[in-house]
Amino acid sequence: MAYQDFLNVRDRVAFGQGPYETTPSYTDITKPDNSTDNAVRPGGTFATGRQNRNGAFEATSVTLDVGNRDGRYTPYFAGSPYYPLTEFCPYQRHVEYPKGSGTWLPIWGGVLTDCEAGFEGAAQGTASLSFQQRLALPGLTPLRAMIAGQILATDPVGFWPLDDDADSTSARDYRGAGYQTLAIARSTAVSVYAAAEFGVAEGLESGSTALALTPNDTRMFGYCLDASFTPRTASATHSASISVAPLPATYPTSYDATVFTFWDSQNRGYSLNIPASGIPRVELVSTAQSAVGQPHSVVTANVDGTSRIDDGAWHDLRVEISEAAGTSTLTLIVDGVTVGTDTFSTVSFDWQRITVGGCPDVGRFMACFDGDLANFAWWDEAIGGGSTISAATATSGAAGLYSTDTADVRFERLAALAGIPSTWIDTVGAFTRTIGPQTTAGRTFADCVKELEAAEVGRLYCDHEGKLVLASASAFYTPPRTLSLSASTHFTLADKFGTDNDNLVNDWRGIRDGGLQQTYTASTASIEKRGQLSKDAGTLPLTTDDDVLEVGHWAVSTFSEPTLRFPKVAVHASKLHAAGLLDEALALVEGDQLVLTNLPTGSPVSSFTGFIERVERVFTNDSLTLVFTLSQWIDVHEFDSATIGRFAEDPGTITLTSTVTSSATSISATTAAGSPPLTNAAGDLPFDISLNGERCTVTAVSSATSPQTLTVTRGVAPTSAVAHSAGAVISIWNPGVLGI
């Protein structure tokens, strides 16, 4: 039976829209105008996931052949309804099952990355559309520093990180407005000892720099940044912010050190200053002046801070002007906290001049700033105290930046820096561990989030809708969906049996910023058997050494011993449809559980519970095959559970005392000196053991001392009873390990 008999396929592209359009408008390209001339040709493999349990998730791609008789898929063909057929627009494939039900299930999502049109003689014939999952896209462009990215996300009028190269003579506007370059300027009486230097002072984040200003001894003269431009449209609302780290010094008693000033076409405006007290102050002039203002003599409104900031640490200073019913409010915000307000009769300022760190005009009665400056920004709106970084969370530079983030919060923050809206990301599972400071400047989104994946021992992947997803370790404790299939009825094996030896680890090491290297090693028996299989996890973005060690414990406990690598399972949609299971099978995604029963004679097990690592939907002219790549399911154990809550000794600690036959129901176990024997408490029985790989259920234990006589049920599924020699290893079946 052809799959078209019981389900429909739909291919949609949002032509002319960006890869992260929040509300894409899709065009159905499956069979345009009910004609086969421009229809999508059957065929294609739509894959998601990874190849094995410890591998990286792949950004998969797919290519569709489409009819192109009218040239609609010819790039830059003016007659195309999709002209100019730009790349990186969203794409989705769905299936409708049952056919005609209106229930459409996402199969795969990505973006258009290439289009090639061909000709048949003199006429247009076919085209190939290539699509790529979004997992590959964010890594193409390096990120800005986290603070810079967060400020830019608020859409400021202008933004100057002040992290320009050491030989720069001006500060570049990252906002890209193009007319607001802040040039280094100086007082006419500047001392030769004064300086304005880019690229030498350390910024708030590791690897970032700041502008260092050094005035003369009196701090009356020195360098600053200055910009004049055509007056902007008058506005009654305004915000500006900057990060400051003044040197621990006392400012002149007669003058206020200027942090920044704004003046409009009528010489009205305000100055943010640090007086001799070290307590920030903002002073505003709302009446027209004959020259650039001298706020000390004509102040309309002013706000003082509440505490000194001349302590050498970084601080965030922000000024806001908001208007309501003809009254404007002047607000000073220090380290994200509003410290004071004042009011004045509303005027509309048309800003035309900005200075940062002082003023080149002699006689302004304002001293030059002495210290470091970074992240100067302004808005034509009152943005509120929480819209940009508060330096209170980063008083020690990078050591404290976003130090309370969990991995899901950090993931969302990084996505915002990369320009990925929340509609195209998702998180799965519980995130409880604190993620440490993270440097982003010059690094890619992919680099940063892969660190989160490693620290969380989770998964980073694209779901079947095309979203970028970060899943925690806890997301795999309980399968969202489980489906049981029989080899005799539903599926065939598309690959060979084997063991999953990829990326085995019995010697692990990792470190965090500011921490000591942590190591975790498996039992001596594991290393003697397989040699030392080392993994260096590098630097993990975690906050404590114990958190780092937990990651190592999980890695070694989970990946020190090989597990059964099950073949790819190929399931034909027509068989599942006939069995009434196709809807459940189509819904399966990575992380779900697939139970295989009635495996062929000669299989290592009669049944297998697998963790779905990869899903492939393979379409041909008339068939649809679902191919699942499985790893062995890892049960999450519970303390005091009768079945899966046991902890085991190191492998080799308990061994078989003497040879047993395949039918023996009484066996003798010897425990190595210094180690506890198996429990014989009535409340602990029954429990399962592994007798050299054979699963047995222990129903009675003779004593609490070694050697012990065990009464057992042999060959418990999925294993079979066989004879064993003396010295065979006895261990807890499916032992518990400490999780994350």
Image (cartoon, helix red, strand yellow):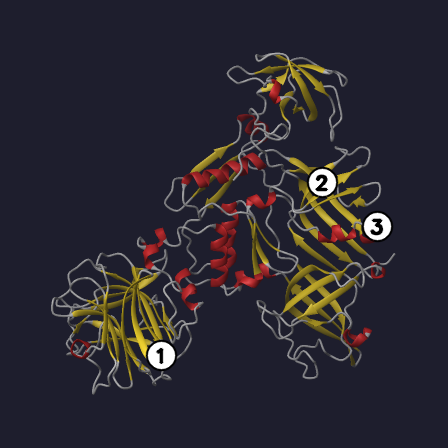
Which amino acid type is marked by label 3? Lys
The image shows residue 40 at horizontal and vertical percentages of 76, 69
- Of residues 21 and 441, the one nearer the viewer is 21
Q: Earlier in the sequence, mark 2 or mark 3?
A: 2
Q: Residue at x 75, y 68 (%)?
A: 65
- Of residues 461 and 665, the one nearer the viewer is 665
In this rendering, the label closer to the viewer, 2 or 3:
3
Q: Residue at x 45, y 46 (%)?
A: 540
In this rendering, the label closer to the viewer, 3 or 1:
1
Say which residue label 1 marks.
325
Alpha carbon of mark 3 to alpha carbon of mark 1: how far?
71 Å
Crowd around label 2: few <14 · some 14–19 · many ≥20 (10 Å): many
Which amino acid type is marked by label 1? Ala
Which SS class for mark 2? strand
Alpha carbon of mark 2 to alpha carbon of mark 1: how far?
71 Å
Q: Earlier in the sequence, mark 2 or mark 1?
A: 1
Is residue 241 visible to us here?
A: yes
Q: 718 left or right of 306? A: right
Q: 250 left or right of 150? A: left
Residue lying farthest to the front in this orientation: 325
Q: Earlier in the sequence, mark 3 or mark 1?
A: 1
Say which residue label 2 marks.
566
- The quadrant where residue 206 appears: bottom left
The image shows residue 511 at horizontal and vertical percentages of 43, 42
The image shows residue 698 at horizontal and vertical percentages of 67, 20
In this rendering, the label closer to the viewer, 2 or 1:
1
